[in-house]
């Protein structure tokens, strides 16, 4: 199957300026005797030439990561070269940062504090816009992408005219995985924030979006996070919270097998006191039991009552989820399968 033609970036406009692609390279600039770019076992450039295109970086800037590079530069530790391409911004030749945004911001911070940084090592990224974007995504020097950042990167490649299969081939993954991550972009902002922070699993999110739609997926996520927090709080306090509180209100409970066996044993022990003659007499039958058995019956009855109440609420919540799903009409159908948990 023939691949679609890859897009070649020619210009980009942001609040920080308009960048025009040029036929200039670091080799050409250095050969022209430009004092701001030198070729010394690679290239060294004036850090003031570095230019960050607003919104280009697929990674969210993290202050702690920036501070780590500030310390490394200050202490003279090795910092990987910044990867760039030559562009023209508002008529001025600049080096657009492809990989190394945190390092660039760290350098800018150092210089704003009065540090004298004359030159830094840079590497020129070859290829078209897709190749440059691919390099930024796959770089082993950068922080690992979060699921939401990965979704944004895949979407960026789609906007450049690539199919999901081509994206997968370019980045060494599978078309199915590309599709999974793109599902995350359908999530409400609140759910995306939960995924980005690591509060909620991306895998659970894209599965629920497919099965139930985005709004229902948010409702499921919030309930599962609540139940998890209840369980963790009880654990921290050294308590064993009731299963009905630490289980998602979207999941049905059932009595644990051991307790079912206890109930079965009680019924069997009481049944031996009932004779056919007593039943035929059609009169009240008195059964006797130990206090311990009576206490166990009361305990089990209370637990069964709690489970029934929880399951009734879960059933109602599942109906509401189904209503959300129907109103959204997601592209991939499939009923939300209610999971059962065993009440310990």
Image (spheres, helix red, strand yellow):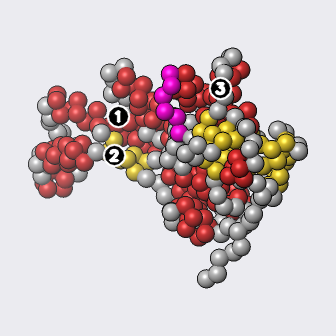
Q: Identify the residue position indicated by label 2 in the image.
A: 342
Disc number lying in front (1 or 2) = 2
Q: Position of residue 162 (x, y in %)?
A: 68, 67
Does the residue at mark 3 contact the one at mark 1 (Cβ under 8 Å)? no
Q: Position of residue 4 (x, y in %)?
A: 69, 75
Please give the label number shown on residue 117. 3
Q: Identify the residue position indicated by label 1 in the image.
A: 302
Disc number lying in front (3 or 2) = 3
User: Cα distance, mark 1 to mark 2?
Assistant: 16 Å
Among the two numbered marks 3 and 1 on one chain, the one whose residue lies closer to the N terminus = 3
Residue name at image x 15 percent, y 35 percent: 289
Q: Residues within 10 Å of mark 3 (few under 14, many from 20)?
A: some
Q: Residues within 10 Å of mark 1 (few under 14, many from 20)?
A: few
Which of these two is toward me, 210 or 83?
A: 83
Magenta stretch holds residue 341: no
Q: Position of residue 169 (x, y in %)?
A: 55, 68
State whether the magenta stretch is mostly helix, strand or loop.
loop
Identify the image quadrant of residue 92: top right
* Magenta extent: 75-80
Any part of residue 302 in sight: yes
- Name the secondary structure under disc 2: strand
């Amino acid at each position: 199957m023939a691949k679609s033609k890859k897009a070649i970036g020619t210009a980009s406009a942001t609040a920080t300026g308009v960048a025009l692609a040029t036929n200039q390279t670091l080799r050409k600039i250095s050969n022209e005797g430009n004092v701001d770019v030198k070729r010394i076992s690679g290239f060294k450039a004036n850090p003031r030439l570095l230019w960050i295109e607003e919104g280009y970086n697929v990674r969210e800037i993290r202050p702690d990561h920036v501070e780590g590079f500030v310390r490394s530069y200050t202490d003279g530790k090795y910092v990987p070269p910044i990867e760039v391409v030559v562009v023209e911004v508002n008529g001025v030749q600049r080096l657009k940062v492809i990989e190394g945004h945190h390092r660039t911001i760290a350098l800018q911070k150092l210089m704003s504090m009065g540090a004298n940084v004359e030159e830094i090592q840079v590497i020129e990224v070859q290829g078209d816009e897709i190749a440059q974007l691919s390099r930024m995504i796959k770089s082993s020097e950068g922080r690992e992408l979060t699921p939401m950042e990965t979704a944004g990167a895949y979407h960026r490649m789609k906007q450049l005219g690539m199919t999901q299969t081509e994206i997968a081939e370019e980045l060494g993954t599978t078309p199915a995985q590309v599709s999974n991550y793109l599902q995350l972009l359908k999530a409400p902002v609140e759910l995306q924030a939960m995924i980005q922070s690591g509060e909620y699993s991306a895998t659970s999110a894209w599965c629920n979006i497919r099965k139930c739609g985005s709004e229902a997926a948010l409702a499921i996520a919030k309930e599962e996070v609540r139940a998890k927090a209840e369980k963790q709080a009880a654990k921290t306090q050294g308590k064993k919270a009731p299963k009905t509180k630490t289980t998602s209100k979207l999941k049905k409970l059932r009595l644990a097998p051991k307790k079912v066996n206890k109930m079965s044993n009680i019924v069997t022990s009481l049944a031996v006191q009932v004779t056919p003659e007593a039943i035929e007499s059609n009169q009240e039958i008195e059964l006797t039991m130990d206090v311990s058995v009576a206490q166990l019956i009361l305990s089990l009855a209370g637990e069964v009552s709690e489970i029934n109440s929880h399951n009734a609420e879960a059933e109602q919540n599942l109906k509401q989820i189904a209503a959300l799903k129907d109103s959204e009409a997601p592209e991939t159908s499939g009923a939300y399968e209610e999971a059962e948990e065993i009440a310990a």
